Image (cartoon, coloured by chain):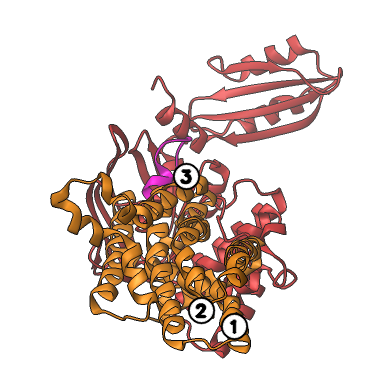
Amino acid sequence: MIEVQNLTKFYNDFCAVDRISLTIPKGEILGLLGPNGAGKTTTLRMLTGYFKPTQGTIKVKDLLMPDDTIKIKSLIGYLPESAPLYYNMLVYDYLEYVAKIKGIDTEEKRLERFKELSKLCGLSGIMDKPISTLSKGLKQRVGLAHAMMTDPEILILDEPTSGLDPNQIAEIRDIIKAIGKEKTIVFSTHILSEAEATCDRIAIINKGKIVAHDSTKNLKQSVKKDSIIRLTLCDAPEDEALALLKNISPELEIKPVPSASKEEASFEITTLNEHDLRKDIYLAVKKTDWILTELNKETQALEKIFQDLTREDA
Amino acid sequence: MTQIKTIAIKEFKDYFISPIAYIVISLFLIVTGWFFFSTFFIYDRADLRDFFSLLPITFSFIIPAITMRLFAEEKNVGSYETLLTLPVSFKDIALGKFAAATLFSMAMLLPTLSYPIFIAFIGEIDPGPVIGGYLGAICLAAAYCSIGIFASSLTRNQIIAFIIGCAFCFTLTILDRMLFFMPAKLLAVIQHIGASSHFNNISKGIIDSRDIIYFISVIFIFIFSTYLVMHEKN
């Protein structure tokens, strides 16, 4: 669907995006991950034709940038970061303007589409309000309606959930998942759990370069070995508990962590092998008269990869 | 074409949503009305010559105030990104905004039609110079709008856009009064570049193709420059 080759962007002497190559097949959700200033927004802006690349080619379907830029633009729905809209317009007027520019030419078709969009994006109560009076989340929804106006085949969303409250984040994610079934979606974020929950594939960008690019599953598996177990015991003296844990396997890395109350002792156990230790821990604790209140395995796969690949000194 | 129309209508409506339109129109009417009528009964002539002779100067300050927001505000707010990622060509955007500004200047001139109607009641007015005057005013307004839009496309700050626009328009307006300081060889060229002489010709009722071509070329040059600036800046 989208083919990007050797995409490069220089701002004067500063190289914001450095020879990025990506292929995004139809019907896939690609998450663009990276720390602030990694070049995510610049990449997306080049994909949408807002910025001209210094070098490299962008091919959407059989259309090539920059010759068919306008045709490509009509295939893409784009939600810029923080959804900049015309603040003095009413939501309805704004959507009508966008619909007209995007070529929905009759009043009936427009009304029909507005009804669908207002259901999908939850705009029904705010159609008659000026955009300037809307909260950030509502503006984001108007922006999303703007992007999806003509039911485009490709959606490009730049940090669609930044600055939203948890409910709104969940709603936007649901929308992305719902429409992602039949559309190609590229979105950027720096929230890892979000990418993990919604994306089929993830590309991690750092300093303008792609440092990892694989399906979400593969990425997570590549560091599966490293997991952390959180254990909290009630009525257990700390040193005795430590001794017990050491007994299970001597090469465990055990770190006591401050617990919520005095009767409880909490530990973080880092394991290096794939064997699930929770069984052993449970069986060991069962033999004592301590009470097990927490036994939780956290796989930090994405965080780990992300930190390894994007940390300054890495 | 429909996209130019859509953008033009949207921008034209935008003027009337905010108070800018009403402030600019009142200011324009007060200034021109005052200068015109303060001497009207002293001269005792049933024509609009004094009104039209002032237009180039007032326009060179009023028109940049109308056009300053067209690009600068969008860039500042960020909606420029939204606009440029819609399936519209740069040419359509520039022309749509130009059409909106020109339409707005015409709307601003509309109330002044009451002057010739009023004069027709109290004296005999020659319709030729009045029609020519309004035609010239529209040409002048359109030319200055294109300059203002060009100035607005250069920056994200509306005040800077206004000042650049004023500087350009004012230079064009007073250029043929500055001939005294110019080298003799260039006189003819400089006189032709100045806007006032062309405007004066039309407003006398003489519609010469040279003057019309002058205004069309100014519009073309600045709209095309706007287009180039848009290309260069992205």
Answer few, some or many: residues within 10 Å of disc 3's Cα (few below 14, many 20 plus, some between 14 and 19). some
Q: Is residue A157 above or below residue A244?
A: below
User: In the image shown, does B126 or A281 lie closer to the viewer?
Assistant: B126
User: In the image shown, does B106 or B50 lie closer to the viewer?
Assistant: B50
**Measured from the top left, where is residue A75 in percent x and y?**
38, 70
Q: What residue type is labelled 2?
A: Asp
**Residue A35 drawn in magenta:** yes
Q: Which chain carries label 2?
A: B
Q: Is mark 1 on a helix, strand or loop?
A: helix
User: In the image shown, does A167 or B85 lie closer to the viewer?
Assistant: B85
The span from disc 1 to disc 2 (Cα, nearest Å) is 8 Å
Shown colour of chain B: orange
Which residue is located at x 66 percent, y 69 percent?
Answer: A90
Q: Is mark 2 on a helix, strand or loop?
A: loop
Q: Are marks 1 and 2 on the same chain?
A: yes
Circles 1 and 3: CB atoms closer than 8 Å: no
Q: The red chain is which one?
A: A
Range of residues picked out in magenta:
A33-43
The span from disc 3 to disc 2 (Cα, nearest Å) is 38 Å
Which residue is located at x 48 percent, y 35 percent?
Answer: A36
**Measured from the top left, where is residue B76 in percent x and y?**
51, 48
Would you name the residue on which mark 3 appears?
B160
Would you name the residue on which mark 2 appears?
B47
Answer few, some or many: residues within 10 Å of disc 1's Cα (few below 14, many 20 plus, some between 14 and 19). some
The span from disc 1 to disc 3 (Cα, nearest Å) is 40 Å
Dot placed on the residue nearer the N-terminal end, 1 or 3: 1
**Residue A32 drawn in magenta:** no
Circles 1 and 2: CB atoms closer than 8 Å: yes
**Measured from the top left, where is residue B17 in percent x and y?**
65, 67
Image disc number at residue A139: none
